[in-house]
Image (spheres, rainbow, N blue to C red):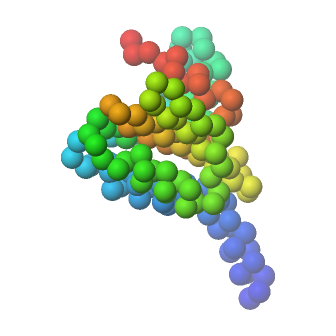
Amino acid sequence: MKQRIIIGLLLLLPLLSQAQSPAIEALYDCYGAAEGITSVMLERKMMQMMSTQAEQRDDSELARLLDEIGFIRVLTTTDDTDLAAEAERTVKADKHFELLTSTTADGRTTRVYLRESKLDEDKELVVITHGEDETTVVHIFGSFDVREISRITSIRPR
């Protein structure tokens, strides 16, 4: 009996370690359909399709990066909401997120947080940018290399 319990726990361990932060999920659930907020969600299938397109354009590095990303979710608003403050509270409440960088320029503050799992390669990157005119929260989940994530900005629609 003891052996079955241990085997069961070992089988569940990878599933538990792959789950993204439930607090960040709740933030997107709350604000994703809110008035005045634009929500963009690029889920796993879309990331795979974009990876295929990058491969067809002979950009194998970008294709590999996109294939490693589980999803990208973006919330943005020009309204005077508490989205930035709520996102900051949510990330700081999860003790597993670590501040990577914080910059302020021209009245805009950008903070980048990373959450790494000790059990697998999955990571979460949360970028919170806010200023007088706009607030944006970007959440990226997957097994990507954080140093290569800026490559996503090279993607242009055809």
Whether residue 60 is situated above or below residue 18 in the rendered picture: above
Q: For the view shown, which residue lies furthest in the left direction? A: 35
Residue at image coords 33%, 56%: 30
Whether residue 16 is situated above or below residue 146 in the rendered picture: below
- Which quadrant of the rendered structure holds the C terminus? top left
Give how far across and how far down residue 88 sits, in percent.
49, 51
Give how far across and how far down residue 121 sits, in percent.
70, 46
Please indicate whether residue 1 sits to the left or right of residue 127 in the image: right
Residue at image coords 62%, 52%: 97
* Frontmost residue, 61 versus 28: 28
Give how far across and how far down residue 31 sits, in percent.
32, 51
Residue at image coords 66%, 49%: 98
Please indicate whether residue 26 sits to the left or right of residue 57 in the image: left
Residue at image coords 28%, 43%: 80
- Which quadrant of the rendered structure holds the N terminus? bottom right
Q: Is residue 51 visible?
A: no
Give how far across and how far down residue 57 sits, in percent.
54, 11
Please indicate whether residue 94 sits to the left or right of residue 80 in the image: right
Whether residue 28 is situated above or below residue 58 in the rendered picture: below
Q: For the view shown, which residue lies furthest in the right direction? A: 3
